Amino acid sequence: MSYYQRAYLPHWHPENSAIFLTWRLFGSMPTPPPQSHRLPAGKRFVAEDRALERASGPHHMKDPAIAGVVAAAIKYGADPLRLYDLHAWVVMSNHVHILMEPRVELSRITESIKRYSARKANKMLGLTGKPFWQIESYDHWIRTNEEFDNIIQYIEFNPVKAGLVANPEEYAWSSAGSEACVTGPNAQKELV
């Protein structure tokens, strides 16, 4: 098991475990919901994740071209780079969720996706040299098959809960959508 700590959060990564990973646009951190500090960690994450949709910060990934850059970086990391096996993902207007099994150190994965997508997106937005992503990412290793299935559903229904679409398949920037292609030996589906 590897362990490291960045600015605020500890990161534990057991070998051969799926990881649920989330990161946000720079400046998109919402004010925590009232009393969220009293919730267990998982429920607190869900409450804060829902607050992201109401956050007043940047929503750069509402632009399909920017969302496409991020989605392409996620898929490229899985295939052809083979940095991870990709199970589910979604690009929302101000944050990203991924469920994967890393093949390399998680820090290398997040650095690769975030650096490439930030450089491309900032160039498109005319924000070259400005921070695009928050430095910190949230990660959680998956402990059971039931949790794995629940997180896939959570990720793919994120656009439905945000009121963007009626069904997960209608959202192009996710593993459930028509633009998606989920890869890896344990992938449950492949869409073209």
Image (tube, rainbow, N blue to C red):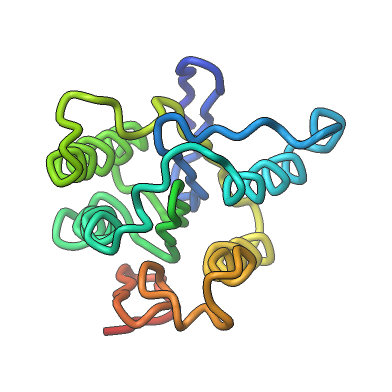
Quadrant of the image occupied by residue 107: top left
Quadrant of the image occupied by residue 44: top right
Q: Position of residue 77 (x, y in %)?
A: 23, 53
Q: Position of residue 72 (x, y in %)?
A: 22, 60
Q: Judge by depth and name the residue closer to the eye, 120 or 5.
A: 120
Q: Judge by depth and name the residue closer to the eye, 56 or 16.
A: 56
* Residue in the picture at 45% in, 29% down: 27
Image quarter hosting the C terminus: bottom left
Q: Is residue 23 placed above or below 187 in the rendered structure?
A: above
Residue 72 horizontal side relative to residue 162, left or right: left
Q: Judge by depth and name the residue closer to the eye, 116 or 160.
A: 160
Q: Is residue 23 placed above or below 156 in the rendered structure?
A: above
Q: Is residue 89 placed above or below 122 in the rendered structure?
A: below
Residue 181 horizontal side relative to residue 37, left or right: left
* Residue in the picture at 54% in, 32% down: 29
Q: Judge by depth and name the residue closer to the eye, 110 or 146.
A: 110
